[in-house]
Structure formats: C-alpha cells, structure tokens
Image: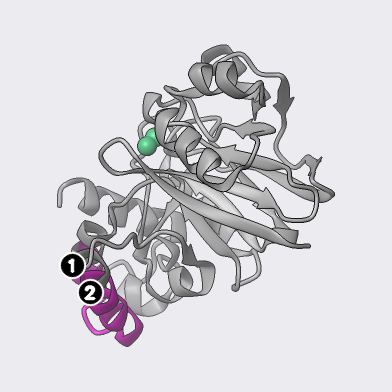
Amino acid sequence: MPFEIVTIPCLQDNYAFLLHSTESGETAVIDVPEAGPILAALSERGWQLSEIWITHHHWDHVDGVADLKDATGAKVIGAASDAHRLPPLNHAVKDGETYRFAGAGVQVLDVSGHTVGHIAYYVADAGAVFTADSLMALGCGRLFEGTPDQMWNSLSKLAALPPGTIVCSGHEYTANNAKFALTIESDNPALISRVGAIETARAAGQPTVPSTLANELATNPFLRAHLPNVKAALNMKDAADAEVFGEIRRRKDAF
Ligand code: ZN
Ligand code: FE
C-alpha cells in the first residue's frame, strides 16, 4: 500500500511525522509539538489532515493538538489508559488493538517506560513504527514513570517487528546518544560506521531520524542488553536482561 512519510522538525529538537496515503489522500500526523510547522508541511503539499495520533502526554508531544484540531478538524487518537491527561480524544485505543487508517491496519503497542501509557503505532503496510520517546535513534527515552523491566519489555516488543521497519522517533538526540553508545560497545563495527554517518548528517544539518529497526538492532545499546558481549563489558555476565538494560539506562542518565 502506497504511503509517504514526512519528517517535520518542531521546537528545539522534536519531530512530528506525516503519514500520507497516496491512494486515498488521507493524512495522519503523529504527535504535535506545535501546530505551525505541521500546517506549513500540509499546505506545501496540498494535503488535508484527517487524524492526529498522540504517543504520550508530555507537553512537547501534545502542545499543538488543540490548535491543529481547530485548524483542520482532524480527529484525535490516543491511549485510553492515559485519556485523563491527554487532550480530548475522539478515539481512545488500547494496547494490542488494530484500527483502520486509509485501508491499512494500525497496530497499537503499549510501550510504557518513559511514561506509563506511552503507545507506539505500527503500520505494517507503511513499513513504519512511530515510537516517539520509547525506542529512539541509538537511544531510548528516560524512565520518568516506568521501571527498567517495563521499558525492556516495551523495547523487546519493538525489536520483534520486521527488521526493515522504519523507526520514526520523537527527538534529534542521536549525536549525544552516539557518544554514549561508544562507551558501551567501543569495538562494534556497525556502531562505529553509524557514528561516522551521524556526524556527517549533523554537520550537513540533516536529521538522523527516522532510522531502521535493523540499524537499531545492530547498534543501539538499549536493544542489546541481552547480548553476552554487552553483559561482559558491564561485568554483568549472569544478570537478567532487564537488569543489564537498567544499568545501561542509569549510565546514560549520568552521562
Ligand atoms: Zn516525552
Ligand atoms: Fe519528548
């Protein structure tokens, strides 16, 4: 099914995404840090917004929802479990459910950890997952509300998607994530070459988001906590995967 994805820089270092069906003409936006850049991206292309999909309650992902809804009349979708602290929803969705958009299935995945109630949207027909502050390019969101167990479980669900999946995450934090990743796996050749590509992209003012799941699996330390070489590097050979993940997350918080 033909879909087009547009990455829209917002605020300081946030990203929103348009998902546009070239067949039906319908367009969804994933997260609304601010309405202006999204309205500009829509009018540049002559697209009409049909839906707003919210990933989690943080202000830098929802602040523009009311303005964007007023301007477009788009319907707002978000997690039922978080409805009490999200902008008003037209459609509240639950973990594991699949709803239809432009003839495609959109699978809702609970990816709690950064917040409890954070969801990701997986659109198999677009080959894309919208992860915001759960799985990020070479990183993952800080654990503001959830536990390491919860986040490890959330990341494991995302890691099980097809490796070719495009990972559309919420921030341009990749250069800093790269420096940290090298402290965990300084001798990972895939990581070393990705760090070079990130430096080149940032020097040219290019975004490093989206990435692919295959690239994240090969280089993102937060997806690699189960690997014997990573456990050994942290002197945690016999520790459980989620514990190793928790240690990597603690180190990143202090980095
Ligand atoms: Zn957040
Ligand atoms: Fe955020």
Looking at the image, residue 64 lies above or below residue 214: above
Image side of residue 251 versus residue 154, left or right: left
User: How much space separates mark 2 and mark 1, taking CA atoms?
Assistant: 5 Å
Image side of residue 181 versus residue 129, left or right: left
- Residue nearest the observer in this picture, 144 or 5: 5
Q: Which mark is residue 130?
A: none
Which residue lies at the image location 21% right of the left edge and 71% below the top edge?
199
Could you say which quadrant of the image residue 159 lies in? bottom right
Q: Secondary structure at mark 1?
A: helix
Which residue lies at the image location 52% right of the left edge and 53% below the top edge?
6
Q: Position of residue 53 (x, y in %)?
A: 61, 34
Q: Quadrant of ligand 1?
A: top left
Image side of residue 231 versus residue 235, left or right: right
Looking at the image, residue 14 lies above or below residue 54: below
Which residue lies at the image location 35% right of the left edge and 47% below the top edge?
171
Label 2 CB sits under 8 Å from any ligand 2 atom: no
Which residue lies at the image location 26% right of the left edge and 59% below the top edge?
177
The amino acid sitting under disc 2 is Thr
Magenta segment: 180-199
Could you say which quadrant of the image residue 200 lies in? bottom left
Q: Cβ–Cβ below 8 Å for labels 2 and 1? A: yes
Residue topped by disc 1: 203
Q: Can you say which quadrant of the picture contains the N terminus?
A: bottom right
Could you say which quadrant of the image residue 146 lies in? top left
Q: Position of residue 119 (x, y in %)?
A: 58, 38
The amino acid sitting under disc 1 is Ala
Q: Position of residue 241 (x, y in %)?
A: 45, 61
